[in-house]
Image (spheres, rainbow, N blue to C red):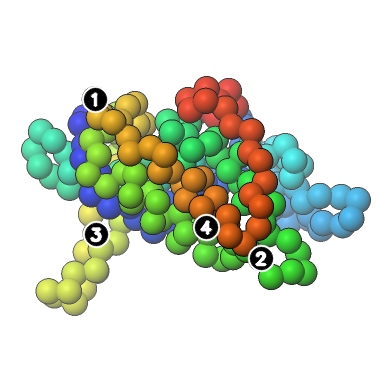
Amino acid sequence: MVVFTALDVRAFSGFYPSCSQCLRRVFIASTSRPTRSRRLRYECRPCGIVWEEGEVEYRYCVTLTARQADDGSCKDVVVFGKSLNVVFGAPATHLHRFIQRYIIPGATPLIDPRSIFNIMAEPLRIVLSGKCFTALLAKSRTRSKNWSRDVGTRQYSPRYIGTMFSLLGRMPFPVSVLSHLQHQLLTKSPAPSLSCHPAGAEEDES
């Protein structure tokens, strides 16, 4: 178990559709064509399972630049799963459904689906930057790219997969990704109600 201090949130943090069996990302099946009577289908290639759109669960994935407490080194730590419920303010599947309520085909969306991860980055930084957390790490097979202005080249640093066990200290509630989105939309349209489980009480994510 290692103690870290979160320094920044990397790009593309958010959530993704996942397989309920292996928790890997699922992709739209190549033969899937949505119609009025049929929804999209998602395929888990490693498991060979095809999921209907309504059966797909979403899972959080946040990449943090963090400082390790014992040696002061900086690492890119990728955190997955329901341990992030308290940060986002709801389980990933519930937050996804909340956002989809504002993305209406054929209309100007109140939430631009192309910029949703940029929208989530700001409240993630507010909630996590400077916070200490404990995590169990495993080294990833991939490495993150960092641009070095001094030498004008890309430098590669090790990337680590972490399971966040706890955030140390008090969280600055009510700030969360969900509350941030609700605040943004409040003046544009009545926010749809979201039935949230208590943080950490979700039963379909891990």
The CA span between labels 3 and 4 is 36 Å
- Amino acid type at image mark 1: Met
Could you give the CA–CA distance between mark 2 and mark 3, rounded to whole angstroms? 38 Å
Could you tell which of marks 4 and 2 lies nearer the N-terminus?
A: 2
Q: Where is residue 151 in the image (x, y as percent from the top left)?
A: 13, 75
Q: What's under tag 2, amino acid-wise?
A: Pro
- Residue beneath the point at 31% across and 44% down: 128
- Badge 1 or badge 3: first in the primary sequence: 1
Identify residue type, mark 3: Tyr
Q: Which of 56 and 107 is in front in this view?
A: 107
Question: Image quadrant for the N terminus?
Answer: top left
- Residue density around tag 3, few if under 14, some if 14–19, many if 20 or more, within 10 Å: few
Q: Which mark is drawn over residue 184?
A: 4
Closer to the camera: disc 4 or disc 1?
4
Residue topped by disc 3: 156
* Mark 1 vs mark 3, CA separation in Å: 25 Å
Residue 119 sits above or below residue 134 on the image: below
